Amino acid sequence: MPIPNGRSMYDLKDMAYKVAFIFGALIVIYGVLWLLAELGVIPAIVFAIFPQIVLIIVGIFIMYTAFEQKKKYY
């Protein structure tokens, strides 16, 4: 079923699944880092800078997705 901007519902669902997968993976990685920092296996500084690393990764993912969508329709 097409929607006004020309994308199909399948494209939107596919993008939503990709975003959900990325966020799920980031939550798992964050949990593992937290556990390792609490156990003293890794330095606490790695755990402390992880939110900034997540923001960078999410930003790169958003730019990549936007670029791929642009290539797809132009």
Image (cartoon, grey):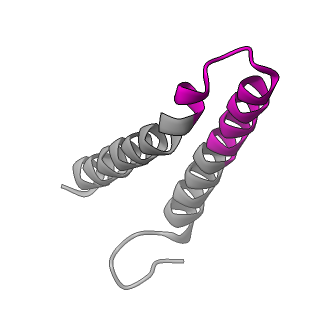
58 or 44, nearer to the observer? 44
Q: Position of residue 36 (x, y in %)?
A: 75, 23
**Magenta region, residue range:** 24-47
Q: Main secondary structure of the magenta part?
A: helix
Q: Is residue 60 left or right of residue 23?
A: left
Instruction: Find residue 46 and report its horizontal and vertical position in percent.
Output: 54, 26
The part of the image, by quadrant, that contains residue 22 is top right
Residue 41, position as x, y percentages in the image: 73, 14
Up-down: is 54 above or below 10? above
Query: Relative to the observer, which residue lies in front, 1 or 27?
Result: 27
Closest to the observer, 69 or 64: 64
Q: How many marks?
A: 0
- Which residue is pictured at 59% across the width and 63% down the height? 13
36 left or right of 64 in image:
right
- Would residue 71 be counted in the magenta stretch? no
Vertical side of 31 occupied by 66: above or below: below
Q: Residue at x 42, y 48 (%)?
A: 55
> What residue lies at 78% left-to-right and 30% top-to-bottom?
38
User: If the image is split into quadrants, where does the N terminus sit?
Assistant: bottom right
* Residue with the most extreme bottom position: 4
Q: Quadrant of the image for the C terminus?
A: bottom left
**28 relative to 68 in the view: left or right:** right
Residue 44 percent location from the top left of the image: 61, 28
Residue 30, relative to residue 1: is it above or below?
Answer: above
Please give left or right for residue 59 compared with residue 42 in the image.
left
Image height of 30 relative to 10, above or below: above
At 68% from the left and 29% from the top, the residue drawn is 33
Residue found at the very far left of the displayed protein: 74
In this view, the residue farthest toward the top is 41
